[in-house]
Amino acid sequence: MESAPASQAEALNALFAEADRLQQEVHSQNPEMICHAGCSFCCEHHGSPITYALEWQGIEALLAQDAAFTARVKARFETLKQGLRQNLKSGELVSLREALFETTCPFLEDRRCSVYAARPLTCRTFGNTRLFADSAPDNWQEIYSCSMEKERWEKQLKMADAPPLNLPPRETLFQTLEGLDGKPASSLLVFLERYFAHATP
C-alpha cells in the first residue's frame, strides 16, 4: 500500500494523541471506567474493528518490521477464517457480518494488543466516549462500550444515582479522521486479508 504523505501521517498521529489525552482525562475523572489490563473482552468478541486506510498503514509498518510477529498473526488469521467458515456452514451464525462481530482480533496476543501503539481510533475511543455529539450526558446507553463494562459500572458507579458523565463524543473524532483519509472505512480483517494475499511468500 502506498504510504501517506508526511502531513497526513502527522495529522493522524496528532488525532491519536488527542484521543489518548481525552481517554486519560476521562479516566482521571472516573477511575472506575478504566478497562483492566488483560480484560480483552472487546478484542475477543468484536475483533474486526472499523479501520481506515490511513490507520492501516501504521499497522502494516509494524508487520513489515518483524517476520516472526507477522507469521504469528497470519497463523491466528488463518485459524480465524477456518472457524468463520465452519460457523457459517453449520448455520450457527447466519451472516458474515454477524460472524465478524463474534470473532477474535488476530492482533490479540497473550490477551494484549500487539499493535497497541498503532491501534485504530475505534479501539482508542472504546469505553471512554459517547457515540454522538448530541448524546445526552445522562444517557448511559450511548456510551461507546461493551455490555460487560456497562454492567460493571452499574455496580461500581451506581448509574441511577451517579451524576452525568462528561464524555467526549466519538463522532467528532471520527469526522476528523474521515476528513484526513478521504476513503470509506473497512474492516481490519479486510485489510489483513489483502495484505497476506499480496505478501511475498
Image: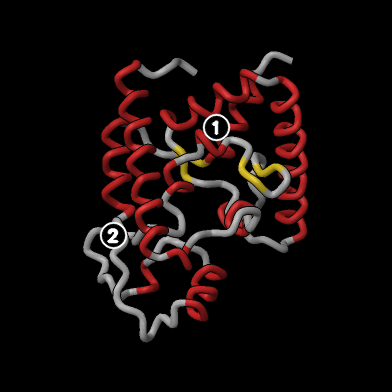
Question: Compared with residue 157, is residue 174 higher up or lower down, i.e. above or below?
Answer: above
Asked whether 62 or 175 is in front, the reply is: 62
Residue at (63, 55) in percent of width and height: 40
Asked whether 93 or 63 is in front, the reply is: 63
Residue at (34, 16) in percent of width and height: 5
Amino acid at circle 2: Phe
Quick check: can you spot residue 88? yes
Q: CA distance from mark 2 to mark 1?
A: 27 Å
Q: On the picture, is 37 further left or further right than 84?
A: left
Q: Which mark is residue 15?
A: none
Asked whether 90 or 49 is in front, the reply is: 49
Q: Which mark is residue 191?
A: 1
Residue corresponding to mark 2: 132
Pick whichever of labels 2 and 1 is earlier in the sequence. 2
Secondary structure of the residue carrying tag 1 is helix
Amino acid at circle 1: Phe
Where residue 116 sits, quadrant-wise, is top right
Dot in front, 2 or 1: 2
Q: On the picture, is 63 further left or further right than 17?
A: right
Where residue 12 sits, quadrant-wise, is top left
Residue 166, position as x, y percentages in the image: 28, 65
Residue 199, position as x, y percentages in the image: 65, 18
Question: Compared with residue 197, is residue 86 higher up or lower down, i.e. above or below?
Answer: below
Residue at (74, 15) in percent of width and height: 201
Secondary structure of the residue carrying tag 2 is loop
Disc 1 crowd, CA 10 A, few/some/many (<14, 14-19, 20+): some
Disc 2 crowd, CA 10 A, few/some/many (<14, 14-19, 20+): some
Residue at (34, 60) in percent of width and height: 131
Quick check: can you spot residue 95? no
